[in-house]
Amino acid sequence: MIFPITFSIPSEKVVTEVPVKTKLMSSLIPGKIDTYIYHNEEDYYAEYRQCLFATTTKKAGWDCMRHYEIMANGCIPYFPTIEECPATIMVLLPKPLLLEGNRLYLKHKDKKINDLKSDDMIECTVLIEKLLEYTRNNLTTSKIASYILEKIDNTHASKILYLSGDTGPDYLRCVTLHGFKELLGVDCHDYPKIQHIYRGSYPHLYGKGISYTNLLDHSLHNDTLDETIEETIKNRVWDIIIYGSYHRGMPYYDLTISVYAADKIILLCGEDTHACNCYNWSHPVFVRELI
Protein backbone atom coordinates (compact mmCIF):
# COMPACT_ATOMS: atom_id res chain seq x y z
CA MET A 1 0.00 0.00 0.00
CA ILE A 2 3.09 2.28 -0.06
CA PHE A 3 4.12 3.52 -3.49
CA PRO A 4 6.82 5.86 -4.80
CA ILE A 5 5.77 8.94 -6.73
CA THR A 6 7.52 11.87 -8.36
CA PHE A 7 6.78 15.34 -9.54
CA SER A 8 5.58 15.71 -13.12
CA ILE A 9 5.12 18.39 -15.75
CA PRO A 10 2.10 19.40 -17.86
CA SER A 11 2.26 17.88 -21.34
CA GLU A 12 1.84 21.33 -22.87
CA LYS A 13 5.27 22.27 -21.51
CA VAL A 14 7.09 19.46 -23.40
CA VAL A 15 8.65 20.62 -26.68
CA THR A 16 7.66 18.72 -29.81
CA GLU A 17 11.14 18.64 -31.33
CA VAL A 18 14.76 19.16 -30.33
CA PRO A 19 15.44 22.93 -30.19
CA VAL A 20 18.38 24.59 -31.90
CA LYS A 21 21.37 24.68 -29.55
CA THR A 22 23.57 27.75 -29.14
CA LYS A 23 25.20 27.03 -25.76
CA LEU A 24 26.89 23.95 -24.35
CA MET A 25 25.94 24.43 -20.68
CA SER A 26 23.27 26.58 -19.06
CA SER A 27 24.48 29.41 -16.86
CA LEU A 28 21.68 28.59 -14.38
CA ILE A 29 23.32 26.80 -11.46
CA PRO A 30 21.21 25.31 -8.65
CA GLY A 31 21.99 27.00 -5.33
CA LYS A 32 23.77 29.98 -6.91
CA ILE A 33 21.18 32.70 -6.47
CA ASP A 34 23.03 35.20 -8.63
CA THR A 35 22.36 32.94 -11.64
CA TYR A 36 18.57 33.03 -11.06
CA ILE A 37 18.11 35.85 -13.51
CA TYR A 38 14.87 34.73 -15.18
CA HIS A 39 11.63 36.11 -13.79
CA ASN A 40 9.07 34.45 -16.03
CA GLU A 41 8.46 31.02 -17.49
CA GLU A 42 9.03 32.01 -21.12
CA ASP A 43 12.56 33.31 -20.54
CA TYR A 44 13.42 30.52 -18.10
CA TYR A 45 12.37 27.81 -20.57
CA ALA A 46 14.15 29.59 -23.44
CA GLU A 47 17.43 29.30 -21.55
CA TYR A 48 17.14 25.52 -21.33
CA ARG A 49 15.99 25.19 -24.93
CA GLN A 50 19.12 26.87 -26.27
CA CYS A 51 21.46 24.79 -24.10
CA LEU A 52 22.73 21.29 -24.76
CA PHE A 53 23.22 20.59 -21.04
CA ALA A 54 21.92 22.07 -17.79
CA THR A 55 22.95 21.29 -14.22
CA THR A 56 20.45 19.88 -11.76
CA THR A 57 21.04 18.52 -8.27
CA LYS A 58 19.48 17.22 -5.12
CA LYS A 59 18.06 20.08 -3.10
CA ALA A 60 16.21 19.53 0.17
CA GLY A 61 14.82 16.43 -1.52
CA TRP A 62 16.15 14.38 -4.43
CA ASP A 63 13.14 15.01 -6.61
CA CYS A 64 13.06 18.53 -8.04
CA MET A 65 10.92 20.35 -10.62
CA ARG A 66 14.12 21.47 -12.34
CA HIS A 67 14.75 17.87 -13.53
CA TYR A 68 11.46 17.87 -15.43
CA GLU A 69 11.79 21.43 -16.74
CA ILE A 70 15.20 20.65 -18.24
CA MET A 71 14.05 17.45 -19.94
CA ALA A 72 10.75 18.95 -21.14
CA ASN A 73 12.62 21.76 -22.87
CA GLY A 74 14.82 19.42 -24.88
CA CYS A 75 17.95 19.79 -22.77
CA ILE A 76 20.17 17.10 -21.22
CA PRO A 77 20.34 17.18 -17.40
CA TYR A 78 23.77 17.02 -15.84
CA PHE A 79 23.05 15.44 -12.45
CA PRO A 80 26.47 14.91 -10.81
CA THR A 81 25.30 13.09 -7.65
CA ILE A 82 22.58 10.88 -9.08
CA GLU A 83 24.55 7.71 -8.31
CA GLU A 84 23.92 8.43 -4.62
CA CYS A 85 20.14 8.58 -5.00
CA PRO A 86 18.38 5.82 -3.00
CA ALA A 87 16.72 3.18 -5.16
CA THR A 88 13.32 4.03 -3.65
CA ILE A 89 13.43 7.69 -4.71
CA MET A 90 12.86 9.10 -8.22
CA VAL A 91 12.05 5.58 -9.37
CA LEU A 92 9.94 6.91 -12.24
CA LEU A 93 12.79 8.95 -13.72
CA PRO A 94 15.01 7.48 -16.48
CA LYS A 95 18.12 7.13 -14.33
CA PRO A 96 20.13 5.21 -17.00
CA LEU A 97 19.49 8.03 -19.48
CA LEU A 98 20.53 10.61 -16.88
CA LEU A 99 23.75 8.71 -16.27
CA GLU A 100 24.37 8.75 -20.01
CA GLY A 101 23.82 12.50 -19.91
CA ASN A 102 26.48 12.82 -17.22
CA ARG A 103 28.90 10.85 -19.36
CA LEU A 104 28.32 13.03 -22.40
CA TYR A 105 28.70 16.25 -20.44
CA LEU A 106 31.98 15.15 -18.88
CA LYS A 107 33.18 14.19 -22.35
CA HIS A 108 32.44 17.66 -23.76
CA LYS A 109 32.54 20.00 -20.74
CA ASP A 110 35.69 21.83 -21.80
CA LYS A 111 34.35 22.62 -25.27
CA LYS A 112 32.09 25.25 -26.75
CA ILE A 113 29.00 24.28 -28.68
CA ASN A 114 30.66 25.06 -32.03
CA ASP A 115 33.58 22.77 -31.17
CA LEU A 116 31.40 19.67 -31.20
CA LYS A 117 31.76 17.44 -34.22
CA SER A 118 28.79 16.24 -36.21
CA ASP A 119 28.92 12.79 -34.62
CA ASP A 120 29.00 14.37 -31.15
CA MET A 121 25.88 16.45 -31.89
CA ILE A 122 24.10 13.42 -33.29
CA GLU A 123 24.90 11.45 -30.13
CA CYS A 124 23.58 14.25 -27.92
CA THR A 125 20.50 14.77 -30.09
CA VAL A 126 19.63 11.08 -29.91
CA LEU A 127 19.77 11.26 -26.12
CA ILE A 128 17.58 14.37 -26.06
CA GLU A 129 15.01 12.61 -28.23
CA LYS A 130 15.01 9.64 -25.83
CA LEU A 131 14.56 11.96 -22.84
CA LEU A 132 11.70 13.79 -24.54
CA GLU A 133 9.97 10.54 -25.47
CA TYR A 134 10.36 9.22 -21.94
CA THR A 135 9.03 12.46 -20.47
CA ARG A 136 5.97 12.42 -22.74
CA ASN A 137 5.22 8.78 -22.00
CA ASN A 138 5.92 8.70 -18.27
CA LEU A 139 6.42 12.08 -16.58
CA THR A 140 3.56 14.34 -17.64
CA THR A 141 0.97 15.22 -15.03
CA SER A 142 -1.71 13.05 -16.66
CA LYS A 143 0.67 10.08 -16.84
CA ILE A 144 1.36 10.36 -13.09
CA ALA A 145 -2.37 10.60 -12.39
CA SER A 146 -2.90 7.45 -14.47
CA TYR A 147 -0.03 5.78 -12.61
CA ILE A 148 -1.84 6.39 -9.30
CA LEU A 149 -5.07 4.88 -10.62
CA GLU A 150 -3.20 1.86 -11.98
CA LYS A 151 -1.41 1.24 -8.69
CA ILE A 152 -4.66 1.27 -6.73
CA ASP A 153 -6.35 -0.88 -9.39
CA ASN A 154 -9.03 1.73 -10.07
CA THR A 155 -8.44 2.88 -13.63
CA HIS A 156 -12.20 3.25 -14.16
CA ALA A 157 -12.64 5.96 -11.51
CA SER A 158 -14.69 8.73 -13.09
CA LYS A 159 -15.34 11.07 -10.14
CA ILE A 160 -12.60 12.14 -7.76
CA LEU A 161 -12.65 14.51 -4.80
CA TYR A 162 -9.23 16.09 -4.25
CA LEU A 163 -8.98 17.54 -0.75
CA SER A 164 -6.39 19.94 0.68
CA GLY A 165 -5.84 21.31 4.16
CA ASP A 166 -3.55 24.07 2.91
CA THR A 167 -4.04 25.76 -0.46
CA GLY A 168 -0.52 27.21 -0.67
CA PRO A 169 1.95 25.95 -3.27
CA ASP A 170 2.88 22.27 -2.98
CA TYR A 171 4.47 20.94 -6.15
CA LEU A 172 3.33 17.34 -5.79
CA ARG A 173 -0.23 18.28 -4.83
CA CYS A 174 -0.48 20.91 -7.58
CA VAL A 175 0.95 19.01 -10.54
CA THR A 176 -0.82 15.77 -9.61
CA LEU A 177 -4.12 17.64 -9.29
CA HIS A 178 -3.50 19.09 -12.74
CA GLY A 179 -3.01 15.54 -14.03
CA PHE A 180 -6.35 14.41 -12.68
CA LYS A 181 -7.98 17.52 -14.13
CA GLU A 182 -6.45 16.57 -17.48
CA LEU A 183 -8.00 13.10 -17.19
CA LEU A 184 -11.41 13.97 -15.74
CA GLY A 185 -11.96 17.69 -16.14
CA VAL A 186 -14.64 19.04 -13.82
CA ASP A 187 -15.28 15.51 -12.50
CA CYS A 188 -12.12 15.86 -10.46
CA HIS A 189 -13.16 18.45 -7.90
CA ASP A 190 -10.54 20.25 -5.83
CA TYR A 191 -11.67 21.53 -2.47
CA PRO A 192 -10.78 24.07 -1.38
CA LYS A 193 -10.11 25.40 -4.88
CA ILE A 194 -6.37 25.57 -5.62
CA GLN A 195 -6.66 29.00 -7.17
CA HIS A 196 -3.16 29.25 -8.62
CA ILE A 197 -3.44 26.27 -10.96
CA TYR A 198 -6.22 28.14 -12.80
CA ARG A 199 -5.74 30.98 -15.29
CA GLY A 200 -4.15 34.05 -13.81
CA SER A 201 -0.83 35.66 -13.00
CA TYR A 202 0.98 34.39 -9.91
CA PRO A 203 4.58 35.73 -10.10
CA HIS A 204 4.99 36.00 -6.34
CA LEU A 205 4.41 32.35 -5.53
CA TYR A 206 7.22 29.91 -4.75
CA GLY A 207 9.45 29.36 -7.78
CA LYS A 208 7.83 32.42 -9.41
CA GLY A 209 4.89 30.19 -10.25
CA ILE A 210 6.82 28.54 -13.07
CA SER A 211 5.47 25.21 -14.44
CA TYR A 212 2.67 24.68 -11.92
CA THR A 213 0.44 27.77 -12.13
CA ASN A 214 -1.87 29.38 -14.71
CA LEU A 215 -2.75 26.01 -16.27
CA LEU A 216 -6.52 25.52 -16.28
CA ASP A 217 -9.63 27.38 -17.30
CA HIS A 218 -11.79 28.32 -14.31
CA SER A 219 -14.72 26.48 -15.91
CA LEU A 220 -13.01 23.25 -14.82
CA HIS A 221 -13.99 24.00 -11.22
CA ASN A 222 -17.66 23.66 -10.28
CA ASP A 223 -18.05 26.36 -7.64
CA THR A 224 -21.50 25.17 -6.60
CA LEU A 225 -20.08 21.86 -5.39
CA ASP A 226 -18.05 23.71 -2.77
CA GLU A 227 -21.26 24.31 -0.84
CA THR A 228 -22.19 20.61 -0.58
CA ILE A 229 -18.90 18.79 0.03
CA GLU A 230 -20.12 16.99 3.16
CA GLU A 231 -23.27 15.84 1.42
CA THR A 232 -21.37 14.52 -1.58
CA ILE A 233 -19.11 12.51 0.71
CA LYS A 234 -22.04 11.12 2.70
CA ASN A 235 -23.82 10.19 -0.53
CA ARG A 236 -20.71 8.50 -1.99
CA VAL A 237 -20.73 10.73 -5.06
CA TRP A 238 -16.99 10.15 -5.50
CA ASP A 239 -15.28 6.97 -6.64
CA ILE A 240 -12.16 7.85 -4.70
CA ILE A 241 -11.00 10.65 -2.42
CA ILE A 242 -7.44 11.96 -2.59
CA TYR A 243 -5.66 14.02 0.04
CA GLY A 244 -3.12 16.12 -1.86
CA SER A 245 -0.83 16.29 1.18
CA TYR A 246 -1.74 14.40 4.33
CA HIS A 247 0.99 16.30 6.17
CA ARG A 248 -0.69 19.62 5.41
CA GLY A 249 -4.21 18.83 6.49
CA MET A 250 -6.96 16.24 6.00
CA PRO A 251 -10.34 17.98 5.98
CA TYR A 252 -13.42 15.77 6.48
CA TYR A 253 -11.23 12.75 7.24
CA ASP A 254 -13.44 11.44 10.06
CA LEU A 255 -16.39 11.60 7.70
CA THR A 256 -14.61 10.03 4.72
CA ILE A 257 -13.28 7.08 6.72
CA SER A 258 -16.79 6.44 8.07
CA VAL A 259 -18.23 6.27 4.54
CA TYR A 260 -15.49 5.00 2.23
CA ALA A 261 -13.46 1.81 2.27
CA ALA A 262 -9.87 2.42 3.29
CA ASP A 263 -8.53 1.62 -0.19
CA LYS A 264 -10.72 4.33 -1.73
CA ILE A 265 -8.95 7.07 0.23
CA ILE A 266 -5.56 7.99 -1.26
CA LEU A 267 -2.85 9.93 0.56
CA LEU A 268 0.00 11.86 -1.06
CA CYS A 269 3.24 12.94 0.60
CA GLY A 270 5.32 15.43 -1.33
CA GLU A 271 7.55 16.64 1.50
CA ASP A 272 11.32 17.02 1.03
CA THR A 273 12.29 15.78 4.47
CA HIS A 274 9.93 14.34 7.04
CA ALA A 275 9.40 11.73 9.70
CA CYS A 276 6.75 10.13 7.55
CA ASN A 277 4.29 7.77 9.23
CA CYS A 278 3.19 6.40 5.87
CA TYR A 279 3.46 2.81 7.08
CA ASN A 280 0.85 3.42 9.79
CA TRP A 281 -2.04 4.15 7.44
CA SER A 282 -4.54 1.63 6.12
CA HIS A 283 -4.81 3.61 2.88
CA PRO A 284 -2.66 3.61 -0.27
CA VAL A 285 0.05 6.21 0.30
CA PHE A 286 2.21 7.72 -2.45
CA VAL A 287 5.49 9.11 -1.12
CA ARG A 288 7.90 11.29 -3.06
CA GLU A 289 11.00 10.88 -0.86
CA LEU A 290 10.41 7.27 0.14
CA ILE A 291 13.12 5.75 2.33
Image: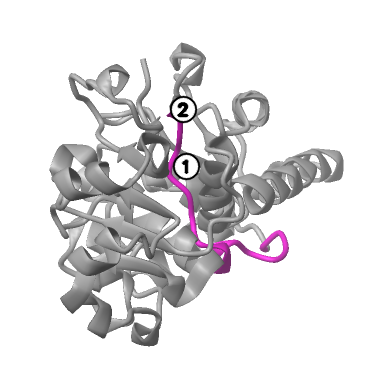
Residue situated in front as seen by the camera: 250 or 17: 250
Residue type at tag 1: His
212 in relation to 76, above or below: below
Residue 240 vs residue 53: left or right?
left
The magenta stretch spans residue 16: yes
The residue shown at (25%, 83%) is 223
The magenta stretch spans residue 184: no
Which quadrant of the figure has residue 211? bottom left
The location of residue 59, given as percent across then percent down, is 29, 31
The residue shown at (34%, 46%) is 260
Residue ID for mark 1: 67
Q: Secondary structure at mark 1?
A: helix
The magenta stretch is: 3-19
**Total marks in image:** 2
Residue situated in front as seen by the camera: 228 or 60: 228
Residue ID for mark 2: 3
The location of residue 276, given as percent across then percent down, is 23, 22
